[in-house]
Image: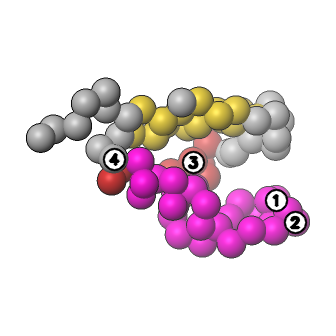
Amino acid sequence: MTVSDTGMGIEPESLPKIFESFYQIEESRAFGGSGLGLTIVKELVYLLQGKIRVTSEVGVGSTFTIFLPYRFPT
């Protein structure tokens, strides 16, 4: 599953931190939020034995891709 936006994008140095609890990019604080959304998504994806990848370009937007296994181990 892929979700893309045309927002402000994420600086390369911020990418490793965006999945941390309560982390917010300084510019995004004007939009509100608690900084938990991506943390929750990451934890749910990992519980389902999947992976999440993000690519972003400042001024262009971001793309989040979630990979989930086709079959779960039994």
Judging by the rendered image, the residue that carries numbered circle 2 is 30
Residue 23 percent location from the top left of the image: 61, 67
Tell me the CA gap for discs 3 and 1: 14 Å
In this rendering, position of residue 65 left or right of residue 71: right
CA gap, disc 4 and disc 1: 32 Å
Q: Dots 2 and 1: beta carbons under 8 Å?
A: yes
Residue at x-position 57% and y-position 56%: 38
Q: How many marks?
A: 4
- What amino acid is found at the position of numbered circle 1 in the picture? Glu
Q: Earlier in the sequence, mark 3 or mark 1?
A: 3
Is disc 1 placed on a helix, strand or loop? helix
Q: Position of residue 55 (x, y in %)?
A: 59, 33
Of pointers 4 and 2, the one earlier in the residue sequence: 2
Q: Amino acid at mark 3?
A: Leu
Q: Quadrant of the N terminus?
A: top right
Is residue 23 at least partly visible in the picture? no
Q: CA distance from mark 4 to mark 2?
A: 33 Å
The residue closer to the viewer here, 24 or 2, is 2
Res. 41 mark: none
Q: Mark 1 and mark 3 in contact (Cβ < 8 Å)?
A: no
Compare residues 23 and 3 and report the one nearer the observer: 3
Which kind of residue does numbered mark 2 sit on?
Ala
Binning the other alpha carbons within 10 Å of mark 1 as few (below 14), some (14 to 19) or many (20 upward) gives few
- Above or below, 11 relative to 67: below
**Badge 3 or badge 4: first in the primary sequence:** 3
For the residues labelled 3 and 2, the Cα–Cα distance comes to: 19 Å
Q: Which residues are magenta?
A: 18-45
Q: Amino acid at mark 4?
A: Leu
Residue 12, image x, y percentages: 61, 42
In the picture of the structure, the residue carrying the numbered disc 4 is: 48
Q: Which residue is mark 1?
A: 27
Residue placed under numbered mark 3 in the picture: 15
